[in-house]
């Protein structure tokens, strides 16, 4: 495997990891108005992601940084063409982070309700923006031979961006519901499980449609098998959730995302930004990549630093692996509070 392909795979892995991990805390936040009708329920929901949400965002920073460092041509085409979605992502993440920190500054119910709504809004906006950017990038942008956007400021925000936004939002909401059924007990667990059972088959459709369209455009038999595996994972997740095996359901639902993402990136390779104007204008990894020397240095740096980061995050998930109840358990780590 050459270095350009290796780093394309690394970028695909980073985006998949981000959606897999940040997806459930986006989903938990989105479900606050639906499942967290009482302050105690909202508090419990936020405790499930309290120690995790900020660490999950590291994957986004790393994914964008990897695109910038390894494929500056991709970054230079992508960002100007989709400026609005990226601004929305930044706005959503900023107000979300502020709300997490300020929510406990006062103990009044009005204050709590206001900042809880901001957490939900920021999460929905960020998830939609990321989905729009990835959907438009993998399904096609109106770019010319120089990689410049053709048309006005909204020309890149057609149906591919809409499909990507809906796909990420729908996946995240159900991902959050399955996560809540895994991490909580009592009435909230029952409500989250019921919600996921009702909506999982529907929520999977936009993501499967997105992956299917990329496969039909430029896929191979391997990506076809990956797409079928993604569809099968939805069924497995639903069946395991129905019999109360939340851990297996969470794994299967996550596997659906991984298989769908592998379909998208595998079918798109080696194109990183397809042009909807002319396929001759497609941006490939060869067009967008830095030199082999730079990629070699980056590979060594990633090989040293990545295991440390992954190990620390795995340790964090292990420490906070227990189910939570309405009141903090004796000895529960302080970081379990959002």
Image: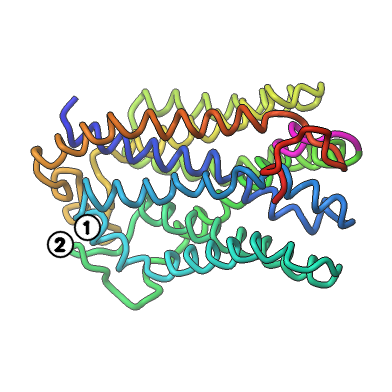
User: What x and y, as percent, mark residue 99?
Assistant: 65, 65
Q: Which residues are magenta?
A: 178-186
Q: Residue at x 74, y 52 (%)?
A: 31
Residue at far bottom of view: 152
**Splitting the image into 4 quarters, where does residue 171 fall?**
top right
User: What x and y, as percent, mark residue 158?
Assistant: 44, 65
**Splitting the image into 4 quarters, where does residue 21 fall?**
top right
Does residue 124 show up magenta in the picture?
no
Q: Residue at x 37, y 28 (%)?
A: 307
Total labels drawn? 2
Q: Which residue is mark 2?
A: 145
**Splitting the image into 4 quarters, where does residue 103 fall?**
bottom right
Mark 2, secondary structure of its residue: loop
Q: Residue at x 74, y 26 (%)?
A: 246
Main structural element of the magenta stretch: helix, strand or loop?
A: helix
> Taking 32 as reference, is 270 left or right?
left
Q: Residues within 10 Å of mark 1 (few under 14, many from 20)?
A: few
Residues under labels 2 and 1: Cα distance? 9 Å
Taking depth in this image into account, of 73 and 65 the one nearest to the observer is 65
Contact check, label 2 and label 1, Cβ < 8 Å: yes
Nearer the camera: disc 2 or disc 1: 2
Q: Residues within 10 Å of mark 2 (few under 14, many from 20)?
A: some
Q: Which residue is mark 1?
A: 278
Color style of the picture: rainbow
> Taking 150 as reference, is 107 left or right?
right
Taking depth in this image into account, of 296 and 223 the one nearest to the observer is 296
* Nearer-N-terminus badge (2/1): 2
Quarter occupied by the N terminus: top left
User: What x and y, as percent, mark residue 314?
Assistant: 52, 29
Does residue 185 show up magenta in the picture?
yes
């Amino acid at each position: 495997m050459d270095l350009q392909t290796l780093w394309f795979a690394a970028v695909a892995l980073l985006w998949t990891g981000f959606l897999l991990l940040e997806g459930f805390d986006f989903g938990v936040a989105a479900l606050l108005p639906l499942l967290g009708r009482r302050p105690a329920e909202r508090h419990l929901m936020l405790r499930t992601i309290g120690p995790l949400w900020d660490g999950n965002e590291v994957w986004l920073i790393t994914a964008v940084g990897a695109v910038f460092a390894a494929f500056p041509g991709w970054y230079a085409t992508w960002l100007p063409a989709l400026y609005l979605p990226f601004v929305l992502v930044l706005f959503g993440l900023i107000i979300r982070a502020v709300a997490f920190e300020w929510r406990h500054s006062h103990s009044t119910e009005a204050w709590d309700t206001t900042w809880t709504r901001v957490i939900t809004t920021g999460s929905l906006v960020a998830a939609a923006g990321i989905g729009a950017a990835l959907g438009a990038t993998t399904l096609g942008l109106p770019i010319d031979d120089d990689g410049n956007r053709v048309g006005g400021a909204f020309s890149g925000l057609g149906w591919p961006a809409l499909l990507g936004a809906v796909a990420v939002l729908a996946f995240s909401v159900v991902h959050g519901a399955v996560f809540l059924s895994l991490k909580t007990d009592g009435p909230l667990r029952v409500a989250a499980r019921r919600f996921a059972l009702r909506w999982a088959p529907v929520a999977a459709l936009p993501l499967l449609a997105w992956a299917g369209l990329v496969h039909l455009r430029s896929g191979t038999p391997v990506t076809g098998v990956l797409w079928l595996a993604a569809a099968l994972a939805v069924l497995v997740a639903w069946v395991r959730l129905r019999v109360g095996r939340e851990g297996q359901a969470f794994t299967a639902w996550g596997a659906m995302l991984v298989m769908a993402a592998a379909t998208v990136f595998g079918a798109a390779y080696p194109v990183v930004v397809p042009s909807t104007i002319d396929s001759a204008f497609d941006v490939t990894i060869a067009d967008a990549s830095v030199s082999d020397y730079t990629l070699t240095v980056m590979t060594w740096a990633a090989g040293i630093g990545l295991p440390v980061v992954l190990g620390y995050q795995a340790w964090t998930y292990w420490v906070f692996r227990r189910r939570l109840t309405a009141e903090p358990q004796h000895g529960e780590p302080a970081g379990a509070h959002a």
